[in-house]
Amino acid sequence: MNETYYLSENSTAGIQDFSAVLAGILPSLKQDLTKDILKDEFEPTQKGYFNNLFDDFVFSTNPNSIIDFLNENAFLLPIIFEAEDKINFFFNKNEENLKLVNLRLEKFLNPETNEEKIILTIILNATPEKAFERFKEFRNAWWLDTVKKTNWKLAIDMDFM
């Protein structure tokens, strides 16, 4: 990553100002991190520093467990970031019967195979018909081609409020 961002102790910026700065920086940090991973220049010492990149996600289980899993499977990060963009494109269109509420990350352990994976759940306030219609579009347009790149360590699901 090329730039370092600091908020000094003497800064007069309030929490809201810092949040606005961070919101502006995160897309760039995600791009830099993705480039490092794809170029295989992702240093193990950097792995602990991407926690704040998931500010837009809710963790349903122990966040440290999820972060540890993603440290070990860093190739999933660009896919998760791209999934976030694709989900926002397909599900965040301000339609009457479809509203994206949140994205949730959880770690899942298959008791039969003892294999772990991350489940990214799209949380919607929507009618089931509209949600499944949109999920089918999302799946056919992007996810079916992408899932193979995850080595089956990432699943995408839906939930309703």
Image: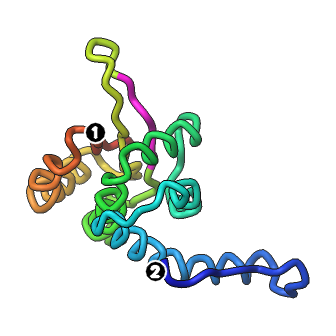
Whole-percent x, y for residue 114 in the image: 33, 18
Residue at x 32% of width, y 43% of height: 158
Whole-percent x, y for residue 37 in the image: 34, 63
Residue at x 29% of width, y 43% of height: 154
The C terminus sits in image quarter: top left
Q: Residue furthest bottom?
A: 12
Residue at x 90% of width, y 84% of height: 10
Q: Which mark is residue 28?
A: 2
Is residue 125 positioned above or below 12 on the image? above
Q: Which mark is residue 153?
A: 1
The residue lying toward the viewer, choosing from 141 and 108, is 108
10 Å crowding of disc 2: few (<14), some (14-19), many (20+):
few
Q: Residue furthest top?
A: 112
| 89 in the magenta segment | no
The residue lying toward the viewer, choosing from 17 and 117, is 117
Count of numbered badges drawn on the protein: 2
Q: Quadrant of residue 145?
A: bottom left
Upstream in sequence: badge 2 or badge 1: 2
Whole-percent x, y for residue 116 in the image: 35, 29
Colour mapping = rainbow
Whole-percent x, y for residue 87 in the image: 30, 62
Q: Quadrant of residue 32?
A: bottom left
Helix, strand or loop at mark 2: helix
Q: Which residues are magenta?
A: 104-109
Whether residue 161 is visible to the viewer of this picture, yes or no, is no
Q: Given the image, on which type of amino acid does mark 1 rest?
A: Lys
Residue at x 44% of width, y 40% of height: 69
